[in-house]
Image: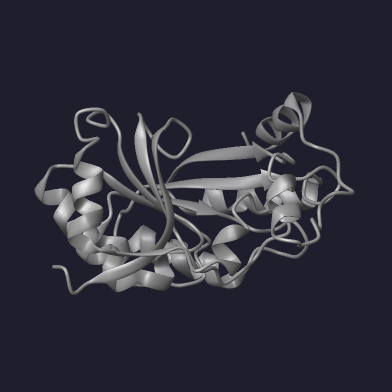
Amino acid sequence: MDQCKARIDSIYNGSAVDGKGLRCVVFFTGCNMRCGFCHNPETWTEKGMEISLSDLVAKIMRYKSYIKNGGVTLSGGEPFLQADFCKQLIRQLHIQNINSIIETNGLICDTQLIELCDGIRLDIKNQEREADPRAVEFLKVCQQLDKPVTLTNVLVPTLNDSERKLGEIKRLKDTFSCIKEVKFLAFRKLCESKYQRLNMPFPYDKYREGDRDDLKKAYDYIL
């Protein structure tokens, strides 16, 4: 097990927004999209730390009693870039009866990894262009495997809050029964200091943050 290694940015224990219940979140490094609103730009450019499978499982096990009504969420970055490690990690977590879900952009479709996990949080990136067809193909596999999906979408005012853009989300929800929930996430600028630290421009600085009215409009449209 020690021969299997991955690169991660960090581990956060106690998240209540990355799946049901309190969760331990593993942030993997590496991303194949680099969205302008990303809250974790450090996972693009910094190598993070190398960790063995056994060490990561041991770290997670410290929180087992704390996350017993939640589980572990593999996030990033993009976990599917390190799919082989994630498969082995989930197998080890399942031995300990720990629920394991994955947050992804859906552009890499590894059927075996999808089948292994307990659920998917699929973030649809339609802020500056149409939703990527690869994410739709990803959903087709989830549908075939009857894998529960939470669809997430960062709502950026004037970019993807129009009826046309919201209609993309509604069509996905109405087409795929594997989608059990849609969660709109209001755009926030809390990450701006990270871009400054990394000496990177923050591409979405010109957009206003989302608010409750924006979220209500979006939910009202898709229901």
Q: State the quadrant of the N terminus.
A: bottom left
* Residue extending furthest toward the right: 206
Residue 12 at x, y percent in the picture: 41, 41
User: Camera-side residue: 219 or 86?
Assistant: 86
Q: Quadrant of the C terminus?
A: top right
At horizontal 41% and vertical 68% (from top left) the residue drawn is: 80
In the rendered image of this protein, does residue 72 appear above or below residue 218? Answer: below
Residue toward you, 217 or 112: 112
Judge from the rendering whether residue 218 lies leftward or rightward of residue 109; answer left or right.
Answer: right
- Place residue 99 in its image quadrant: top left
- Residue at the farthest left position: 95
> What colouring style does the render use?
one colour
Q: Quadrant of residue 38?
A: bottom right
Query: Does 193 sit above or below residue 116?
Result: above
* Vertical comparison of 80 with 116: above or below: below
Which residue: 73% across, 59% down? 36
Count of numbered badges drawn on the protein = 0
The residue that appears at 15% across and 55% down in the rendered structure is 92
The percent coordinates of residue 53 (x first, y second) are 22, 62
Question: Could you tell whether 56 is left or right of 27 in the image?
Answer: left
Specify whether residue 146 is in view.
Answer: yes
Please determine whether, in this image, residue 162 is positioned above or below residue 110: above
Residue 63 spot, x, y in % from top left:
25, 35
**Does residue 111 appear anywhere in the picture?**
no
Residue 195, image x, y percentages: 72, 55
Q: In the drawing, does residue 157 fall left or right of residue 171?
A: right
State left or right for residue 183 relative to residue 109.
right
